[in-house]
Amino acid sequence: MSLNKFISDTGYCSRREADNLITEGRVLLNNRPAVLGNRYKPGDTVEVDGSIITAAKKEKRVYLALNKPTGITTTTELHIKDNIISFVGYPKRIFPIGRLDKDSEGLILLTNDGDIINKILRADNNHEKEYIVRVNKPIDGAFIHQMSTGVPILDTVTLPCKVQPMGRQTFRITLTQGLNRQIRRMCEHLGYAVVGLQRVRIMNIKLDKLALGKWRYLSDAELSTLMESITDSAKVSPSGKPAARGGKRTEHKPTPSKGGFTPKDREQTGKRKSTKYVTKDGNPQTGKKTEHTTTTPSKGGFTPKDREQAGKRKSTKQVTKDGKPQTGKKTERTWKKEKSAQARKGQNNRPEKNTGKEKKGQESRREKRTGAEGSFKNYRSKGRR
């Protein structure tokens, strides 16, 4: 048999703890340091921390139910204060099946039968554990629905479970998982704090009227039903690893539109939008144009609008000031020279609307009334209207 099972069968510790002892180099097999995967055969010598472990006789298995109070730590490490083994004080070596938080109370099983631990605890076996929980504020339908459908914690989403309200701030929850501080983390994610948590059932074993801090042996009827329930339960998954929840997800890969990926396709693949292979209006291009040629220039050169679409700085090069294309290759420097020449001549860029004697006559009459001296002001000072 495997070495960890041999150590467990002697009642020294559970298989998991035996694996830890082997990993830490505290186990010798035939005077050599043991490693994980070693096998034990009759006649081998096994030492743990210098003490020889002998094959135990087939002794009667022990199955206990304890109503654990708060403040007791679920561990077999005897040096830890308020550990569950010292609290129970059973004369034979036993270990707990699973864990119950230090701040929680209620039913927990203890045994010296290492074969049933994983069969009971594995989530794939769908064995139920029932709790009564009290939170710090009133619960509503949305809270019950979210708790029962799944809550994201510890880089996963909890499996669907049964949740039933029992009062204004109390509910009953039935789990098949055993994540670390699962119920407390689920409530915290939804904005609640657990102020009281009690486990009242493990599979067919119920807490009933067992007093807080007391333990009892499982009855023959309870033990018979328990063993029947775990007959088809696996200790480990077929692959040796925890089974993944649901089927394997495949990544959705969108099919590109005709002529290339559109911006919508880029969003689906999680990539940055790009105008490459498509024009600005989303229609695919026929050629392999680069991102800088997605805008077609106007006849005679790029206009300021074209420059803006292409993402470049506006420029007056190749266009006149009013935005019309030039016919020749006039540079910006030449255009500035012409502008300065017009300023020296006192010419306006905008042509006058009215010219001739009529304009001149209107200006002369206007100057008499609104001259430099301010004729309207002079009229008022002279008392004239």
Image (cartoon, grey):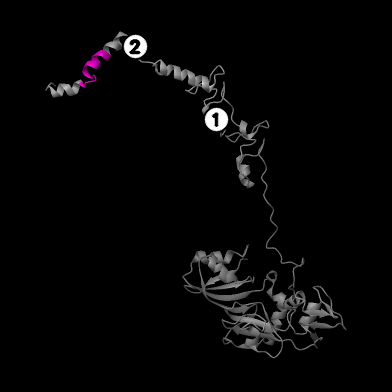
| Residue 270 x, y percent position in the rendering | 63, 47
Kindly give the residue lying farthest to the top in the view shown. Answer: 357
Name the side, left or right, on which 158 lies relative to 227: left
Q: Quadrant of the C terminus?
A: top left
Considering depth in this image, is 170 or 221 the residue closer to the camera?
Answer: 170
Kindly identify which numbered label has been placed on residue 355: 2
The segment highlighted magenta reads 363-374
> Which structural element holds mark 2?
loop
- Residue 170 vertical placement versus 85 (above, below): above
- Residue 310 vertical placement versus 104 (above, below): above
Q: Earlier in the sequence, mark 1 or mark 2?
A: 1
Kindly give the residue lying farthest to the right in the view shown. Answer: 43
Q: Examine the structure image and report whether residue 136 is included in the region drawn in magenta.
A: no
Q: Residue at x 52, y 19 (%)?
A: 334
Name the side, left or right, on which 101 lies relative to 9: left
Image quadrant of residue 297?
A: top right
Q: Residue at x 57, y 81 (%)?
A: 71
Residue denoted by label 1: 307
Say which amino acid is labelled 1.
Arg
Kindly give the residue lying farthest to the front in the view shown. Answer: 344
Considering depth in this image, is 90 or 384 the residue closer to the camera?
Answer: 384
Residue 150 appearing in the image = no
Q: Residue at x 71, y 65 (%)?
A: 243
| Residue 81 x, y percent position in the rendering | 61, 83
